[in-house]
Image (cartoon, helix red, strand yellow):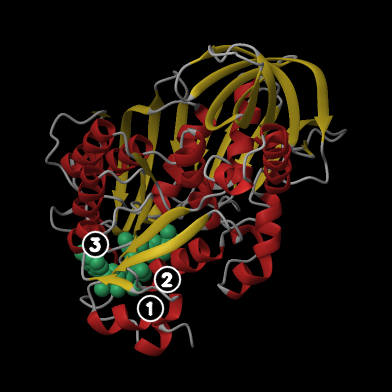
Amino acid sequence: MYTGCGRVLGYHGDLQFQSGFIFYFPKKNEKNHREGYYIVWIEYLNSSLTGSLTESSSWILKVDFYKEYKQMENLNRRDFLAHSVATAAIASGLNPQQLSAFSGQSKLKVAIIGCGRLGQQYAEIYRALDQTELVAIAEWNPERRKVVGERFGVKALFRDAEALLKEVVPDLVAIITPTKFMKDGVIACAEAGVKGVQTDRPFAAKLSDADQMIETCKKRGTVLAGGALERANWQVEEAGRRLASGELGQRLGAAVHSYRGEILAGGTARILVLQHFTEATVDELIAWGNPIESLSDEATDYGLSINGLFRLSSGLECQVFGNESTAPHRGVEVWTENGLVRWDRHGEPLTQIFHGFDSKGRRKEVDPNYRPWSWESVAKELEPFLYKLGMRGSERDYVLGPITSLIDAVSKGIPPRISGETQRHALEVAIACKLSAKLGSEPVKLPLADRSMALYPRPYRWLGGDVSGRPQSAVEAAGKK
Ligand SMILES: NC(=O)c1ccc[n+]([C@@H]2O[C@H](COP(=O)([O-])OP(=O)(O)OC[C@H]3O[C@@H](n4cnc5c(N)ncnc54)[C@H](O)[C@@H]3O)[C@@H](O)[C@H]2O)c1
């Protein structure tokens, strides 16, 4: 028996899927991996199919399905794997322990670099998941390093990424330092052979830094993913897919609301969703900014409010509202002739779909009927724990979403919902908005030619709490407050 965990490309009826887990039982004396019996677990259907292999390269498999189709409503992925491994062990006479290395049940080793307020939230979740094991922490502040080591039961403690990578090369690394240090962390991890890294936001201030991270990760085959941003939430993923499917009709327009405050933070959240909902990027923009002082060269994004117009690569126009927006929703909307999809950053629910009109001509909200998230049972199980961490209601998956997306990217080859490229585009849009506003609302084309251009976040995000007058106490770092 062979097992593989990687990208499975398959078809069932009209349905194409890209995510799964395959068990292969070869026919006797079959050497070409062509004939045999396959059981494939399809991630988002929570079901298994049997079929025959039509094409195979190392991690990309194409499967045509036949005969059996089992909907296993009450079976989760772990139970399915355990069942299949047990079946295979009996069939092949192997010790089940020999098979566990192939079963996908071996845990991904994780390190946290920068274990302050937010890094501790990542550590909590990575430690709680069955799929991962927290093996090392790099934290600059010596007192906090000791405290978080004790809190998370981690003995491999280091000052920084360099020291950590000399001793251990984890599968996944969450780089939750202040933004200034993310680039060095990402590059060091990619060069050391880490399979997947994620940063939180903003992931860079300078365009050339973003370029360098993306290029190095690409060269080294490292997945570069994002952190706590709503784009990683399954509902947002699915809302975008509803638009992409065309069932609501052709997209006619888009709006971004409340592009202000910190356009590198909440603003990045908006531009990521805009890219997803429109399947397009910003080609050209014109912007107005206030207050005027925030348009100086030295100023950060803090307090800057942008109104403007984006011209998208799809030809669509997107209206951008800053402070002046009186819309009750604070996210992104995309509409069609008779439909509208909304993501509201602080909304309950987080996304809404409208299709058709009622007798008074008002938009009719419809049941979004999203496909089930493959991590939903895990999320449900962790709900009380996440609640205690402050992740409640529509924020339940705020950190769990990006973490599970990175795990899926590394273990199954599913592209991360937040990539380095989409984050770079969000940074580029923010820089171009400020530039356009500063030049007296000149149209600006993207991508920007001058890669030395930058926009800095406020000092807390750029340099961290210890340096900007908001240090985290040892009691808080110990999780006791
Ligand atoms: N997505 C969100 O909602 C959200 C929320 C809060 C913070 N953030 C972002 O997360 C990042 C961290 O924020 P925070 O609130 O945890 O800050 P923090 O100051 O509490 O923690 C940062 C930690 O990183 C450590 N550190 C700094 N440089 C390091 C290095 N080179 N190597 C190892 N450790 C290093 C510091 O000692 C500190 O403990 C910032 O970029 C911030 O913008 C995002």
Residue at numbered disc 1: 148
- The first of marks 3 and 1 along the sequence is 1
Residues at badges 2 and 3 in contact (C-beta under 8 Å)? no
Where residue 130 sits in the image (x, y, percent)? 58, 58
Q: Which residue is at the far right?
A: 359
Q: Nearer the viewer, residue 401 or 273?
A: 401
Q: Amino acid at mark 2?
A: Gln
Residue at numbered disc 3: 164
Where residue 5 sits in the image (x, y, percent)? 54, 34
- The first of marks 2 and 3 along the sequence is 2
**Is 359 placed above or below 381 here?**
above
Q: Secondary structure at mark 3?
A: helix
Residue at numbered disc 2: 120
Q: Amino acid at mark 3?
A: Leu
Task: Decide if ligand 1 comes within 8 Å of the CB at mark 2.
Answer: yes
Horizontal side, residue 473 vs residue 12: left or right: left
**Is 71 placed above or below 11 here?**
below
Q: Residue at x 55, y 53 (%)?
A: 131
- The first of marks 2 and 1 along the sequence is 2
The crowd level at tag 2 (other Cα within 10 Å; few <14, some 14-19, many 20+) is many
Q: Nearer the viewer, residue 11 or 239?
A: 11
**Viewer-nearest of labels 3 and 1?**
3
Q: How many marks?
A: 3
**Is 166 placed above or below 82 here?**
below
